[in-house]
Amino acid sequence: MISAQQIQTTMARYVELVDAGDIDGILALYNEGATVEDPVGQPPIQGLADIERFYRQGLGASKVSATLTGPVRATLNGCGAMPFRVDMQWAGQPCSLHVIDVMEFDDAGKIRSMKAYWSEANIGPQP
Amino acid sequence: MISAQQIQTTMARYVELVDAGDIDGILALYNEGATVEDPVGQPPIQGLADIERFYRQGLGASKVSATLTGPVRATLNGCGAMPFRVDMQWAGQPCSLHVIDVMEFDDAGKIRSMKAYWSEANIGPQP
């Protein structure tokens, strides 16, 4: 089982990679058969090929910055949750999206599932 | 389906009730058959009687304060996630526990499941 500290390090690294727009780096964190549900309520996508398409269409098509806004919460059974903020342009205006990602990790420390909690209710002006 | 705004209001209210130590108020937010997994990794408890025992043994036995530390993230399918901080005494020292709660709501707006993400890795000095 991956430790709480490993979960904290990997999830903080994920936000840095989103901030850098490093999609190859992000994909390297995922298990081959992982699922992504972003936002929660959308049908989950499964497998690295679809996950790569998801990040290239989203993150690859826009200029965003991402900032962790509190500590990564890590459990003793390989799960983590973290609050972060994505700053971007929305309809030509600068705005911020507040997200919480919940991740499950496999024993090798790769992401087995990612769920992103947000909706338009979490979009507002930049701080 | 409960709206994103209703989810935000109910979850912010939950933190206020924890802060006030109002266990009856907390229980009134739960569905009869709800499940609670706190922290994630522990066996879930189910049903209001066991949930009441959980809060009375935990929250009822100590003096804590609770503060929301960022916006409640709410989805369009009845789920929410929020970061908060619990300030308390731990082994005689003041300390803070950083938690993220994820909740699912039923169509009446009651909590159907609560999962609390944290471990000892999330305990530190008070800010």
Image: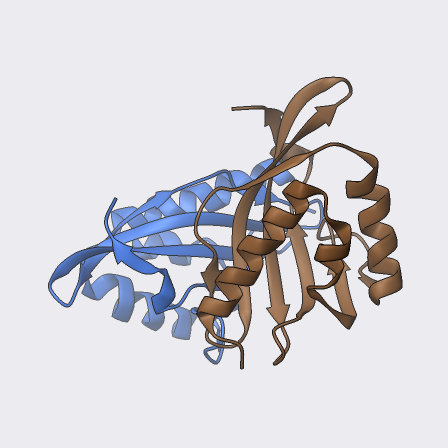
Chain colours: A blue, B brown
The x and y percentages for residue B86 are 63, 36
Q: Residue at x 23, y 49 (%)?
A: A126
In the image, is B5 to the left or to the right of A54? right
Most foreground residue, A99 or A47: A99
The x and y percentages for residue A105 are 60, 54
In the image, is B10 to the left or to the right of A54? right
In the image, is B76 to the left or to the right of A74? left
The x and y percentages for residue B75 are 47, 70
Most foreground residue, A52 or B53: B53
Most foreground residue, B55 or B122: B55
Count the labels in the image. Answer: 0
In the image, is A127 to the left or to the right of A75? left
Extreme residue in the top direction? B92
Most foreground residue, B28 or A36: B28
Q: Residue at x 44, y 42 (%)?
A: A12
Q: Is residue B109 visible?
A: yes
Q: Residue at x 46, y 53 (%)?
A: A29
**Is B74 above or below relative to A63?**
below
Q: Is residue B75 visible?
A: no
Q: Residue at x 71, y 50 (%)?
A: A77
The x and y percentages for residue B12 are 54, 54
**Is A118 above or below relative to A17?**
below
